[in-house]
Amino acid sequence: MKALLLLALIAMLMPAAATAGVRPRYGGELRVLLPSPPLEFDPARMNSFADLAAARATQATLLEHDSRGALRPGLLETLPAPEDGGRSYRLRLAPGLRFQDGEPIAASDVAASLARLAGPPSIHAWLTSSIAGAHAVKHGHARLIAGIEVLSERELRITLSYPFLDFPQALAALPSAIVRVDKGGNLVGAGAFRPGGERRFQAFDDCEGGRPFADSLALAGADARAAAPALADHRADIAIRPELVEGGSHLETAPLGLVMAIVSQRLGPTARGTWVALDAVDRRELTRFVRAPAAPLNSLLPASREKGAPRGAVPMPLPRKITLSFPDNSDALRAAAARIQVSLYDRGVKVALETTPARLFAARLASGDFDVALLPVWLVSPVPALALAQIAAATGGFERAARVLAQAAGADAVALSRLSSSLETDLLAVPLFSTGLRVAAREGVEGLWLHEDGTPELGDAWLWPEGSRGP
C-alpha cells in the first residue's frame, strides 16, 4: 500500500547497511491494542480515539494526509482546486474504485454518503455545514444536500454557502469517509481492512491505495498492566496507551485530545463564578497528574499559550457544593477531577466526583443534566476552523457549530483567537489541557506511521516472520 512512500520512509528510518535487501512482506495478522475497545464503527457517530483508529483501518476518505501532513488524493483522482473564490469545488473520483462488498464507487455514492453524514443521527454533521443545503438535511427536510451536484459517474460539484478555502480539509477528516448502506442495512466502507468478525478484519485487496501488507487485523482494548506483557511475548504487535509501554520502537501522536470543563447554566447566579474559579486552576499542576503526554491549554484552539490574567476582577458568588461529572473510561480525567476537587475546596466549594459510562456521557451533556462536566474531545482535524467547530458541536450542537465554522472560515489568527475566547464565554467552557498518546510497536513490526489526526496507518505496517529478528 503506497509502496513508494513506505520504502522511502523505511530508507529514512533505518541505517543503509541494515536496510540492504529489505522489502515489505505480505502476510500475518496485525494485533493492535487500543486505549479502549472501539465502540462505534460508523464514521458519522464515532466519538473516541479508539473509534477513529478503527475507522482509519477500515474506511477511506476522498482526501487524506501523507506522513508529513500534506494533503493528497484518497478516493479522488486529484486535489480539488477552489472555484468561484472558494465557494465551490469540483471533485473527480479515481477510476476503478470499489466498496468492500465489490460494488463500484460512483459520484452518486459520494453524494449519498455526505448526505448521510449531514443527517439527523450524525454527531459530525458540522463537517458538512458549509455546504449549501446541508441544514435542510440535518433537520430532516431533505434527503440529499442541494449543494452537491452529480455531474457524471465520476464527477460532482460541491457548492458552499460561503467561501471556505480549508473545505478540502473537511473532506480529509475521518468522519467524512465514504460509505454505503447495503440492502441488509449494513454499513460498507472502502478502507484497507474489511469486517471479518467481532473487532477482526480481513485485508481488502481492492483498496484504493493497494492491498494492505497484513492478511488480517485484530483490534482490542487493553489497560496499562496488560499492554506491556502482551507486546513482550508477541501476543500483540502494537500498543497505544497514554503512558509509555516498554518494548520495541515508539511514536507519539499529536496532542489532539482536548480536555475542558463545562459549567451548566443550571447553577444559576453562581454559574459564572464557578467558571471563573475553574479558569484560575493551575493547568501545569493539573498536567503533573496526567500520565499521557500533556500540555497546559488556555485556549480552545489546538495550540497552548501561557496563562493570562484571571477572568474578571470583581469577586463572584460561588456555590457551596457542586457535582463534577466525567466519563468513566479515562484515567487522565479522573486525575484532573481529583486535582480540581482540591483546588475548589480551597475556595470553599465542596465538589462531589461522579462518573458516567462513556457511551452515555454525550447524551447527558446535551440534556444539561450536570453541574460541571469534564469533556474530552479528540479533534478529527488540527485545522483551527474545524477544531473550533467540533468543540462547538460537542458542547452546543449542530447550529452553534455551523455558526462558528461560518465565522472561522477565512479568519486570520487574530480573529480566530477572538472567536475562541467568545466561544469559551458563550459555552462557559474552560480549556484545561491537551493530551496525546504513545504508540509502541514490538520488534519485528515495520512501516508504521501516524496520520495528522494521530491515528496509525495500519495498512502500511508489515511483520517479520515469527522467529526472525528482522534487519
Image (cartoon, rainbow, N blue to C red):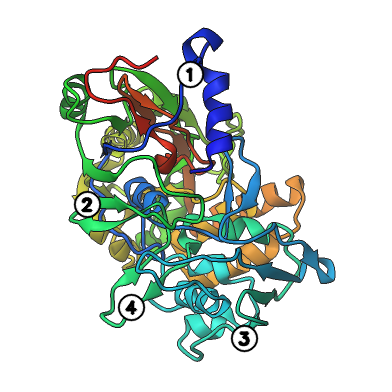
Res. 323 in view: no
Which disc number belongs to residue 199?
A: 2
Name the residue that disc number 4 marks. 182
> In the rendered image, which quarter is residue 240 located in?
top left
Which numbered mark, 2 or 3, is in the foreground of this view? 2
Identify the mark at residue 383; answer none if there is no mark.
none
Q: Amino acid at mark 1?
A: Gly
Mark before the other along the chain sequence, 1 or 3: 1
**Three-letter amino acid code at disc 4?**
Asp
Secondary structure of the residue carrying tag 2 is loop
Q: Please state which of the two labelled residues, at mark 4 or mark 1, is closer to the viewer.
A: 1
Q: Are marks 2 and 3 in contact (CB under 8 Å)?
A: no
Which residue in the protein does label 3 denote? Answer: 146
Q: Which is in the foreground here, disc 1 or disc 3?
A: 1
User: Do callouts 4 and 1 mark residues in contact (Cβ within 8 Å)?
Assistant: no
The amino acid type, in three-letter code, at marker 2 is Arg
Residue 21, which numbered label?
A: 1
Compare marks 4 and 1 and give the one earlier in the sequence. Answer: 1
Q: Which mark is first along the chain, 3 or 2?
A: 3
Q: Residue 168 is drawn in which quadrant?
A: bottom right
Q: Position of residue 99 (x, y in %)?
A: 42, 67
Q: Which quarter of the figure is the C terminus placed in?
A: top left
Name the residue: 72% across, 69% down. 89
Of 21 and 35, the residue lying toward us: 21
Residues at discs 1 and 2 in contact (Cβ within 8 Å): no
Q: CA distance from mark 4 to mark 1?
A: 44 Å
